């Protein structure tokens, strides 16, 4: 019989790639979706017939208990969250409810319905925040710099706590930034590649950005979802950093993306204070050696390939909308 997995956040970037990957591994895939007045299944439209969508919300524990009772998954991947750092200053309580307490609700639902379920928690390099060492690894102390980062620290530790308290197979993947042509338009990589495509098409004249000096360890989302699955293949649950080991500034991203379209970024980029943050994470660079040696994980796509892929996809998208 095929193994069944439940993905929360299936309509998001990672959820869509993970669903594709698990279907390819022969899984039956259930995806938890929250009610909205308009359907937003764009990222999973191509696999919608192959997955089962079930209604639930991380704010509502009963909905998750019912989903687990009805779907009986062997694995749960908790990818749902309020995931945009900037929004977390405007909606700190909602971010805490979803991104922090939502994890406890799901862990509790698992404990109540079936403690044999294997659990993956989408933890984040934002937990390292004002970094205490370079590069960051599993043992690096956390120093979050945003309500989102604080909420993710809670989500991480409650996962560890339920593992230790109830012997759940609950693992936490500390994933560094990962991007793709399916990335939300508000995140800097996609904002830049989509902005480049619009400028190249003559639609926009300028691209307004915030801090160009911030440095991130950017990888490709499709590579990173494989690591999630590998974590649940291990006999023992654990925490793993998933990263490329390289860091690049926002400025480097901008230079590369504009150059890919034959444009000089300095003619188009303007700095707008609205995109600066009350507290910044200046430098992230992860050490993925534990994931590589224990899980056998490796990435296929590097930073330059990622930027080229995203610019190309956005050029095609903008062109198709014009035509
Ligand atoms: P994303 O594209 O923003 O997707 C977030 C998903 O969560 C969407 O499907 C969204 O549903 C769902 N969601 C939000 N609030 C919910 C609620 N109350 N109940 C149920 N579902 C809810 O995020 P992503 O980039 O795929 O990231 C996936 C996870 O990894 C997140 O937890 C994120 O914080 C974490 N993470 C991401 C990165 C990264 O670089 N991408 C790095 C480290 C950790 P709607 O479609 O209905 O909005
Ligand atoms: N979004 C955005 N928009 N960011 C900008 C801009 C802009 O106009 N200009 C500069 N930046 C800088 C931000 O200040 C930040 O330092 C960096 O670009 C990356 O911002 P985002 O792409 O919004 O991502 P993030 O690093 O804050 O958060 C992402 O990665 C985390 C993992 O470290 C999200 O995916 C989180 O959910 C994830 O946990």
Image: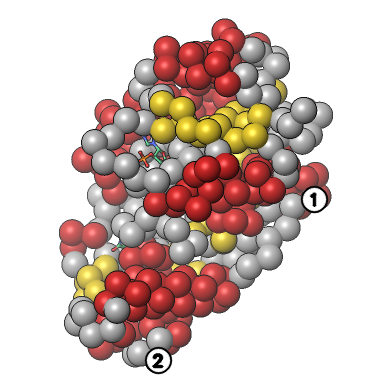
In what quadrant of the picture does the C terminus appear? bottom left
Say what secondary structure mark 1 lies in: loop
Q: Is residue 77 above or below residue 146?
A: above
- Label 1 crowd (10 A; few <14 / some 14-19 / many >=20): few
Q: Residue at x 60, y 66 (%)?
A: 246
- Badge number at residue 323: none
Q: Give how far across and how far down residue 63 sits, in percent.
A: 42, 17
Say what secondary structure mark 2 lies in: loop
Q: Residue at x 66, y 29 (%)?
A: 4
Q: Residue at x 72, y 41 (%)?
A: 26
Residue 161 shows up from this direction: no
Residue at the spot of label 1: 296
Q: Is residue 309 above or below residue 228?
A: below
Q: Give how far across and how far down residue 205 sits, in percent.
A: 19, 82
Q: Nearer the viewer, residue 128 or 192?
A: 192
In what quadrant of the picture does the N terminus appear? top right
- Badge number at residue 262: 2
Q: Quadrant of residue 188?
A: bottom left
Circle nearer the viewer, 2 or 1: 2
Q: Give how far across and how far down residue 221 sits, in percent.
A: 55, 56
Q: Is residue 39 above or below residue 185?
A: above
Q: Residue at x 48, y 33 (%)?
A: 53
Left or right: 165, with 258 as reference point: right
Left or right: 165, with 8 as reference point: right
- Label 2 crowd (10 A; few <14 / some 14-19 / many >=20): few
């Amino acid at each position: 019989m095929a193994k069944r997995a439940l993905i929360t956040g299936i309509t998001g970037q990672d959820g869509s790639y993970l669903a594709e990957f698990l279907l390819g591994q022969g899984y039956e895939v259930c995806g938890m979706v929250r009610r909205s007045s308009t359907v937003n299944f764009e990222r999973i439209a191509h696999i919608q017939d192959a997955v089962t969508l079930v209604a639930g919300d991380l704010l509502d524990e009963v909905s998750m208990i019912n989903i687990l009772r009805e779907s009986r998954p062997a694995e749960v991947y908790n990818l749902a969250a309020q995931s945009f750092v900037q929004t977390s200053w405007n909606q700190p309580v909602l971010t805490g409810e979803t991104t922090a307490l939502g994890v406890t609700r799901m862990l509790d639902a698992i404990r109540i319905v079936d403690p044999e379920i294997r659990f993956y928690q989408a933890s984040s390099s934002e937990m390292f925040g004002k970094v205490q060492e370079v590069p960051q690894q599993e043992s690096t102390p956390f120093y979050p710099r945003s309500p989102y980062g604080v909420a993710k620290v809670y989500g991480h530790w409650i996962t560890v706590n339920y593992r230790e308290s109830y012997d759940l197979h609950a693992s936490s993947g500390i994933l560094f930034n990962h991007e793709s042509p399916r990335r939300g338009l508000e995140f800097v990589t996609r904002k830049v590649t989509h902005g480049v495509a619009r400028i190249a098409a003559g639609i926009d004249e300028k691209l307004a950005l915030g801090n160009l000096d911030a440095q991130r360890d950017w990888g490709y989302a499709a590579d990173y979802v494989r690591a999630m699955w590998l974590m649940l293949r291990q006999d023992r649950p654990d925490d793993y950093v998933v990263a490329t080991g390289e860091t690049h500034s926002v400025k480097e991203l901008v230079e590369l993306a504009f150059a890919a379209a034959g444009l000089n970024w300095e003619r188009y980029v303007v700095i707008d204070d609205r995109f600066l943050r009350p507290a910044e994470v200046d430098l992230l660079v992860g050490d993925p050696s534990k994931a590589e040696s224990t899980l056998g994980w490796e990435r296929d796509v590097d930073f330059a390939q990622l930027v080229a892929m995203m610019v190309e996809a956005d050029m095609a998208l903008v062109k198709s909308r014009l035509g």
